[in-house]
Image (tube, rainbow, N blue to C red):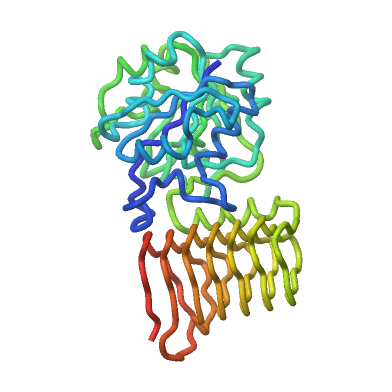
Amino acid sequence: MKGLILSGGRGTRLRPITFTSAKQLVPVANKAILFYGIEALAASGIREIGIVVGDTRQEIREAVGDGSRFGVSVTYIEQEAPLGLAHAVLISEPFLGTDPFCMYLGDNLILEKLAPLVERFREEKPNSQILLARVPNPSQFGVAELRDGQVVRLIEKPRTPPSDLALVGVYMFDASIFRAVKAITPSARGELEITDAIQWLIDAGQVVRPHVIEGWWKDTGRLEDLLEANRIILDTLLPRSDGAVTDSEILGKVVVEPGARILKSTLRGPAIIGKGAVIENAYVGPFTSIGDGVTVRGSEVEHSILLEGSSVVDVGARIESSLIGRNASIYRTVAKPRSFNFMLGDRSEVGLI
């Protein structure tokens, strides 16, 4: 069985971060979102993975390489434009051949272990197995209608959803999916929809099995979902301190990576402090990821993600629910205490007056 990870989206909902970085490489708990998907497939015994790439192909290649550090072999499949999930399947046929495969959207995270579901698919051999999750806003997703435990209809972003069961970004298929994607036509938005392809399988009498996942699922395409995923994953970490901690207080589950320096500060977990980071005369609150080489001095940060090389110095107020891009700099020039929320692109600089 092979794996297929879709990593070609432009990430418009996370701009300006994604003007300069692939959305799948934005870190959650200091690990690129894409890496969670690769690791989930590898843990399921899948050793050959195709990654569909678009405009950010070079950045993805540089981050993932040949896949050997994940214990897999990676093949890159170039998609000339974001023409739909089913189109990504279609152009991957030369790589996938007749093998069954698991397709994983590169910006999705799920709590449930993938390995048992992959094993069940291997053993029982349905034509497709789709993962579903109950959501409060189904009109924003592809939605499944079930009858007697079977999938009878799929609709992409329906105005009037037939259920609250959204398609999670993990699918399993056998080779019959290629007949389906070749039989459908582009939707009104000009894309080959995977929901239409799965509906074709259903109408053709193929076996499409649903599985409603337990626990959380996050499509990390929006800032609030990215921060929520960061919060959830940080809460699973085991505390450890491999850096230098001086005259500081560490409370709760906090990971301090090698080379980090904590001076005269308070860290309240769950949180992670990256390699070479400097936290001085500062407060780092719960659900915060501090990337490698970040500096936080004379400031307070909580429920936020600070990417590699960024700095927050003498802000004088608490930064929360924020995403700070790589090498961005936030500093205070004149004291006016207030609360701030930021979503800054890479190499941004903000002076607070």
Give the answer, above or below, for where 216 lies relative to 224: above
Residue 67 image point, x, y percent: 52, 29
Q: Nearer the viewer, residue 169 or 1?
A: 1
Q: Nearer the viewer, residue 336 or 143?
A: 336
Measuring 41% from the left and 16% from the top, which residue is drawn there? 95
Measuring 49% from the left and 18% from the top, which residue is drawn there? 173
Residue 350 image point, x, y percent: 37, 74
Give the answer, above or below, for where 15 lies relative to 143: below
Q: Quadrant of the C terminus?
A: bottom left
Residue 137 image point, x, y percent: 47, 49
Q: Nearer the viewer, residue 235 or 276?
A: 276
Image check: 188 left or right of 278? Answer: left
Image check: 211 left or right of 349? Answer: right
Measuring 39% from the left and 33% from the top, which residue is drawn there? 155
Residue 231 image point, x, y percent: 61, 57
Q: Quadrant of the N terminus?
A: top right
Quadrant of res 289: bottom right
User: Residue most toward the bottom?
Assistant: 335
Q: Nearer the viewer, residue 293 or 11?
A: 293
User: Residue most toward the top?
Assistant: 98
Measuring 44% from the left and 78% from the top, which residue is drawn there? 331
Give the answer, above or below, for where 73 lies relative to 81: above
